[in-house]
Amino acid sequence: MSVELRGGSSRVGRRTRRPGGDQVSVIPSDARARTMRTAIAVANDYVTLTKPRIISLLLLTCVATMFVADPSGPPLSVILWTMLGGYLAAGGAGAINHYIEREPDARMERTASRPLASGRIEPRRGLLFGSALGIVAVAQLAITVNALTAALAAAGLLGYVFVYTLWLKPRTPQNIVLGGAAGAMPPLVGWAAATGDLSAQALWPFAIVFFWTPPHFWALSLLISDDYARTGVPMLPVVRGETTTRHQIVAYALLLVAVTIGPVLTGLFGLGYLIAALALGAGFVGLSLVLLARPSRQAARRMYLSSLAYLALLFCAMALDRAL
């Protein structure tokens, strides 16, 4: 009797003989290598569904807020469990977003290569993957951290999927303003994980992310407004024009700086944070004014990328101010 293990190679594998005399065809090394590369590519596609680059910034705001809420530092186990649950919840929301937007994504140059849009992963599997991540995240956070943290993570996931993606995004150019609450949930998750409850002071980190989101996202939308117009998504540059969008970026940048000063007035942060907030805010507003005065793709890209650094540095300044 002969048993063959095929690896998709045109070459015949090396044959070995079992003690009983049966012959077995061994998968050639090049076929094994191709199988391994395929498995890695599939795994990478599933990781891509979770939008890891976006999640890294969300997790930073979550963990930094944990140290704001508890300056002595939460236990390492709580931090790690919260990061895991936060990644799973945000990743589940991202995967479901990929599923919902797979058809318009396929028509946009920026997103056409996404796993669901390109057909590398079946839509049903992407939806099941995202749903499973969300369920596991809520259960894990409830068991390893606390129920409030789990509820807030679930609220963020459901808000992103149902309020922003399904309801607001296809209907109004203010989608990112109203839907920004979902992206601002990680600081509340971090606060609840560190303390077990929420106080009025917890609203400051939430508000900062909330008001940061519009200028950040509108800078990106200026870069890809043609894609949004092609797919019928009513983003601000498409509906109101790029000049209005640039004015709105400046207005929200100024509003954001005012919000970042608020927690100093309530006693949450001190002088060190105030200096950092004013310095970072001046740079952020300055870039928005440059974008308004000398509009270009380069200025929009600089505004978009700098907004990422701005939020990361601001939250680091929050945690350091409280720790010191």
Image: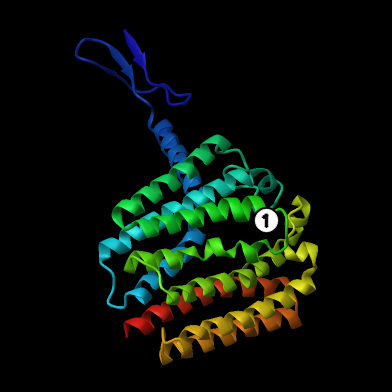
Dot 1: within a 10 Å radius of its alpha carbon, few (fewer than 14), some, or many (20 or more) residues?
Answer: some
Asked where in the image residue 253 lies, by quadrant, the reply is bottom right
Q: Is residue 113 above or below residue 319?
A: above
What residue is at 54 percent from the left and 61 percent from the top? Answer: 182
Q: Is residue 320 above or below residue 25?
A: below
Task: Say what secondary structure mark 1 lies in.
Answer: loop
Q: Is residue 48 left or right of residue 197?
A: right
Amino acid type at mark 1: Lys
Q: Residue furthest left?
A: 19
Q: Is residue 301 left or right of residue 94?
A: right
List x then y, in percent, for residue 183: 53, 63
What residue is at 75 percent from the left and 58 percent from the top? Answer: 234
Position of the C terminus by quadrant:
bottom left
Q: Is residue 122 visible?
A: no
Q: Nearer the viewer, residue 44 or 141?
A: 141
Q: Is residue 75 left or right of residue 6?
A: left
